Image: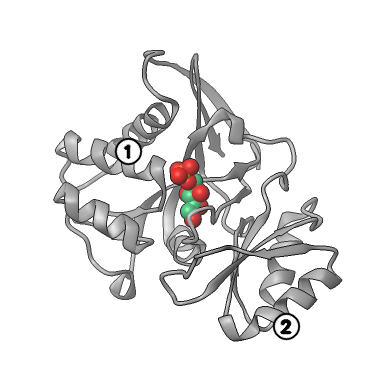
Amino acid sequence: MGMAKRFIEMDSSDCLRTKAAKAALDQVLSVLTPSSVIGIGTGATVEIFIQLLKQSGAEFSHCVSSSERSSQALQQAGLSELPISSCERVDVYVDGIDEGLSSGETIKGGGAALAREKVLATMAMSFITIADSGRLKLALGAFPLPIEVLPAAELAVTRALQSLGGTPVKRENCVTDNGNIILDCSGLDLSEPLVLETALNSIPGVVENGIFARRKADYMAFADDGGVHWLARN
Ligand code: 5RP
């Protein structure tokens, strides 16, 4: 599906993350009801979104967080949260990305929260991404692909990734919220993101990988010095 494009003029003194987060907030507020459940991704951009959401005073049911880090930020902001384990519905999910295509496929996991992020994005009625425009790419793969792996399967998965042409590197000092490790893998062929997403998840020991192709973004905000490019999947 193609993306319709619109350009939003904004104050050039705003930082790029704030611009993108503001654009996402506007979209969220336009659909929010008192019973809405808001899914919260992970990362610096999302933390700005959390602040803006709090400042907006918007009425909604509660948030569901993709990480311990975001849960802490929600708690500090005084926003109500229910655990992901009891989450039955997500109306709108907002998250940062590491790379994205205008057709909606993204790579995530720079913050090691990709597994829960994918659960929430997949549950969500609407998935909004927020990033600076440098993350909008013509092809995925400049960023090594984060893959969450059972610690016991580190060597087995490393071999399997190498046999696919990849070069996995274990992320240092990183244990995910699920108690697993992250292998950052460069050299994989990302020309067909959905094919690779499926293939990687069929390797025993892989918990999840950072390709979001099965669940594409519905709306993408990319901020640059001039404003926010807003892409909407139709
Ligand atoms: C966490 C992610 C982040 O959303 C992604 O890395 C972008 O983070 P930031 O907003 O800090 O640049 O995928 O797993």
Quadrant where the N terminus sits is top right
- 43 left or right, relative to 149: left
Position above or below: 141 against 120: above
Q: What element carries label 2?
A: helix
Tell me the tag on residue 156: 2
Q: Nearer the viewer, residue 57 or 169?
A: 169
**Residue 105 in sight here:** yes
Question: Mark 1 CB in 8 Å range of ligand 1?
Answer: no
Return the residue found at the far front.
Answer: 173
Residue 71 place in picture, x, y as percent: 27, 59
State which mark lies toward you, 2 or 1: 2
Q: Earlier in the sequence, mark 2 or mark 1?
A: 1
Residue 144 place in picture, x, y as percent: 68, 53
Q: What residue type is labelled 1?
A: Ile
- Local packing at callout 2 (Cα closer than 10 Å; few below 14, some 14-19, many 20+) is some
Tell me the tag on residue 220: none
Quadrant where the C terminus sits is top right
Q: Nearer the viewer, residue 155 or 191?
A: 155
Q: Do the residues labelled 2 and 1 touch (CB within 8 Å)?
A: no
Q: Which residue is drawn at 60% across and 30% down?
A: 134
Q: Which amino acid does label 2 sit on?
A: Ala
Mark 2–mark 1 Cα distance, whole angstroms, equals 38 Å
Residue 179 place in picture, x, y as percent: 45, 77
- 19 left or right, relative to 4: left
Q: Mark 1 points at which residue?
A: 48
**Residue 36 in sight here:** no
Question: Mark 2 CB in 8 Å range of ligand 1?
Answer: no
Position above or below: 11 against 197: above
Residue 141 place in picture, x, y as percent: 73, 48
